[in-house]
Amino acid sequence: MHRHLHDVFGEAQRPGQLIAILGFGVAVPATLAVTSPEIVGSVALWRAMLALLLILDIAAGCVANFTRGTNDFYAARPRNRWVFIAIHVHILAVAALLGADPGPALAVWGYTIAGAIAVNLLAGKPAQTFAGGFLLAIGLTGIALWPGLSSFMTVVSALFMLKVLFSFAVDHYASSEIDAHG
């Protein structure tokens, strides 16, 4: 993997996993654009395209962060993981670009970042995976029950939370080794 792509895919990626990452990353915004033309078509083309590009990044990241290549890259670079968490304002940008209600986006962002920080602080501890999954379950329930949230923003919010709070903040492979050995 080219060094400029290490932050996205890690140092190595299996071809099938790379196809899955890119396929899901492209499929989600394309599907949202087709199924929600009233949302995407209500703003200038450049705003819609930028929002869909950010959604591609969110969706692809959900899958990429579960691969050993990406997981191990960040497990070996704890500082990079903190920077990654800190720069994730995608949900706020998508809401702003599409003129969506900023309240739910701010709530999802705040909860996700706070949860990701808490989970990341558990790095190397057996409880990390459980804590990440538990916080994700709470957050997804909150998103699903948010009154008046469009299905478009529900999907984007849920994927953002999955990506940052669980897929990324949890060191999936080290945690499973710890759990299996004590």
Image (cartoon, grey):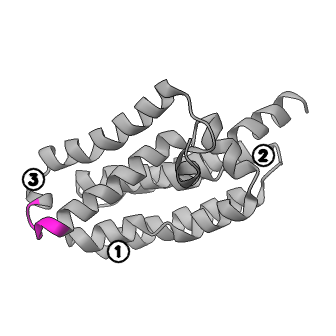
Q: Residue furthest top?
A: 16
Q: Which residues are magenta?
A: 41-46
Q: Is residue 179 left or right of residue 19?
A: right
Q: Residue at x 74, y 59 (%)?
A: 78
Residue 96, percent from left and from top: 28, 74
- Say which residue label 3 marks: 37
Lower position in the chain sequence, tag 1 or tag 2: 1
Q: Is residue 177 magenta?
A: no
- Say which residue label 1 marks: 103
Q: Amino acid at mark 2?
A: Ala
Q: CA distance from mark 3 to mark 1?
A: 22 Å
- Say which residue label 2 marks: 127
Element carrying mark 1: helix
User: In front: mark 2 or mark 3?
Assistant: 3
Q: Is residue 44 magenta?
A: yes
User: Could you say which quadrant of the image residue 93 lies in?
Assistant: bottom left
* Above/below status of 137 relative to 102: above
Magenta residues, dominant SS class:
loop
Element carrying mark 2: helix
Q: Looking at the rendering, in which quadrant would you find the N terminus?
A: top right
Lower position in the chain sequence, tag 2 or tag 3: 3
